[in-house]
Amino acid sequence: MTCALVVSLSGCQRQTETQSGDTRPAVQLARVEPADASAIRIFTGRVEQTSISPLAFEVSGRVVQIAVLEGASVKRGQLIARIDEEPYKLQLQRANAQYQQLSDNLKRQAVLRKDGILSQAAYEQLSASTDAARAARDLASRDLRNTQLVAPFDGRIARRNIEIQQVVQAGAPAFNLENIGRADVGVDLPQSIAERLFVDKTLRAEAWLPGRPQNRFPLVFRERTTQTSPTSAAYRLVFSIEGPQSAMLFPGMAMRVQISETARQVAQNGNKGYFAIPIAAVSIGADGQRSLWRYDAASGRVHAVPVSVREIRNDDVVVAGAVAAGDRVVAGGSQFMKEGMAVRPMDAPQ
């Protein structure tokens, strides 16, 4: 990062009278530099719940088996739980018998219809009854299959809502299944950054768990909000971590998120007019106004220049205001400065 050219940051020192009789306080100056053509910002993010699907039995019954526990990973088609299938076996047997009886009868009546003994209307009524019995048999067969609850996709059991021997109703959520193929990470951005950050699919970002910066997860930009959060004046960015590595992340985990802008993005965003200076160079007045003390080499005096802080980058800040690249500002001890005060740069000859 292009930082300010700082002689060193130690503040303003009151010098004793020198041999030349110069009693001006010596100050350390920093050179104002344009903000970097590329920017790296680190924020705190949090893993969000992504695709969590409630799973429910499609039939009612008594739970006789729970095959997995909370937190367990499951594969698509794997058995999760089962309810008592005996009532549904009996139901299928009865439906099969009814259908078989009507089907056999329909075959016999077809002969009578061919010989003209049975009317067409009577035959069609019997045929409709046979079709209804076939549909009832198919439904009974489906209900029997639905006594088993299986995973519709690869995932992780986030919550279990049933117990063994509990009678559950059809459609009542029995488990919550989390899609572990993707984890979303949300980041709240202050307005000063959100309004300048060029966001598109090329935005580069990565995340890591606090204390484990060596294990980094590449992030894919997913979405952003255009309204502030109801609880804070922040705009939200959501990134995704895709693939098997997302399985080790759980909703609510804190993450450190590094967002990098390329030079192209910064240029498109319009970084002109923003400057990087040491954070110690910014002073805050009683009215809350932030300012720099710019050194005028011609007069040897300092003058206050109001600025607005756009963002903080480690030991530097990015500011906007009536300053220009190449200006020199007091880099420390700005609280001791007064308008028009005569000072001597520490690197100036005495």
Image (tube, helix red, strand yellow):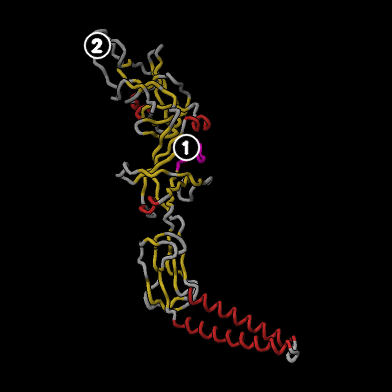
Give SS at disc 2.
loop
Q: Is residue 287 visible?
A: no
Q: Is residue 186 left or right of residue 209?
A: right
- Taking the spot 58% from the left edge, 80% from the top edge, the residue there is 136
- Taking the spot 42% from the left edge, 79% from the top edge, the residue there is 84
The extreme top residue here reads: 20
Quadrant including the N terminus: top left
Percent position (x, y) of residue 187? 43, 45
Q: Is residue 261 visible?
A: yes
Percent position (x, y) of residue 180? 41, 55
Q: Amino acid at mark 1?
A: Ser
Q: Is residue 251 above or below residue 333?
A: below
Percent position (x, y) of residue 350? 28, 10
Q: Is residue 94 magenta?
A: no
The mark that comes first in sequence, 1 or 2, is 2
Give SS at disc 1.
helix
Q: Observer-nearest residue: 94 or 109?
A: 109
| Residue 269: numbered disc | none
Q: Is residue 196 magenta?
A: yes
Q: Is residue 88 above or below residue 74?
A: below
Q: Amino acid at mark 2?
A: Thr
Res. 115 image quadrant: bottom right
| Residue 18: numbered disc | 2
Q: Is residue 203 left or right of residue 120?
A: left
- Taking the spot 56% from the left edge, 80% from the top edge, the residue there is 137
| Residue 192: numbered disc | 1
- Taking the spot 46% from the left edge, 65% from the top edge, the residue there is 54
Q: How much space separates mark 1 and mark 2, taking CA atoms?
A: 46 Å
Residue range (magenta): 189-201
